[in-house]
Amino acid sequence: MSDQSPTALNLPPVDPLPEKTQKYFDICVEKLGFVPNVLRSYSNNIDRLNAFTTMYNDFMLADSGLTKLEREMIAVVVSSINKCFYCLVAHGAAVRELSGKPELGEMLVMNYRVAPLSPREKAMLDFAAKMTEASHRIEEPDRQALRDVGFTDADIWDIANVAGFFNMSNRVSSATDKRPNAEYHSSFR
């Protein structure tokens, strides 16, 4: 993999990028200082890039009973179980930023069970972990445990969708050796 390629695959981006895509990338540079490699990796197929960003934006940024931090925590715990280098680095940085606690991001990366979590956060992450490790074993008591700490059925739907999205994304990232942008490593520490 070259230093310039976001993955181990030789998939050149569409060139030139469609105007709408270029504007999206320009906003990333304006807000983050770079275009995340996950977006660069999908830029070889604009329809797939659009599908990926639509799902990501819906699961991670749309209105929800889950906070942005809670969704990022799910992303890190799922990625930790799956050992996804890209997502651990990128979403670990997001947890550090949103929580203001660098140690929380590190704990979630290594073993969420050592983190000082509220009962709500612990139940949510236990559910996401079980879904990642053995989704076929989830039963009504697992959903009830979430309701018992205040999650609604709509929230449970969102937890499942965020965990499911990152299980898919982790597998694609690992299979293609997607590398995190260097900027993530030192951010919000």
Image (cartoon, grey):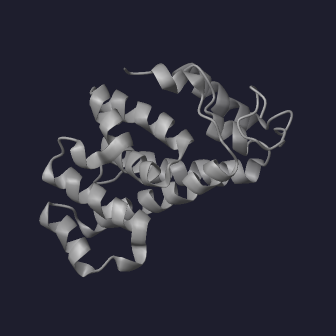
Residue 67 visible in the picture: no
Residue 119 visible in the picture: yes
Q: Nearer the viewer, residue 76 or 69?
A: 76
Residue 157 lies, with reference to residue 113, above or below; the image says below
Task: Tell me the quadrant of the picture where the C terminus can be found.
Answer: top left
Residue beneath the point at 43% across and 59% down = 163
Q: Nearer the viewer, residue 31 or 7?
A: 7
**Residue 69, x across and y down, in percent:** 32, 41
Task: Decide if residue 28 is on the left or right side of residue 47.
Answer: left
Residue beneath the point at 49% across and 35% down = 89
**Residue 122, x across and y down, in percent:** 21, 54
Residue 180 lies, with reference to residue 128, above or below; the image says above
Residue beneath the point at 28% across and 26% down = 100
Task: Tell me the quadrant of the picture where the N terminus can be found.
Answer: top right
**Residue 127, x across and y down, in percent:** 30, 63
Residue 130 lies, with reference to residue 66, above or below; the image says below
Task: Decide if residue 27 is on the left or right side of residue 116.
Answer: right
Q: Quadrant of residue 12?
A: top right
Residue beneath the point at 41% across and 79% down = 136
**Residue 59, x across and y down, in percent:** 45, 53
All told, the count of numbered labels is 0
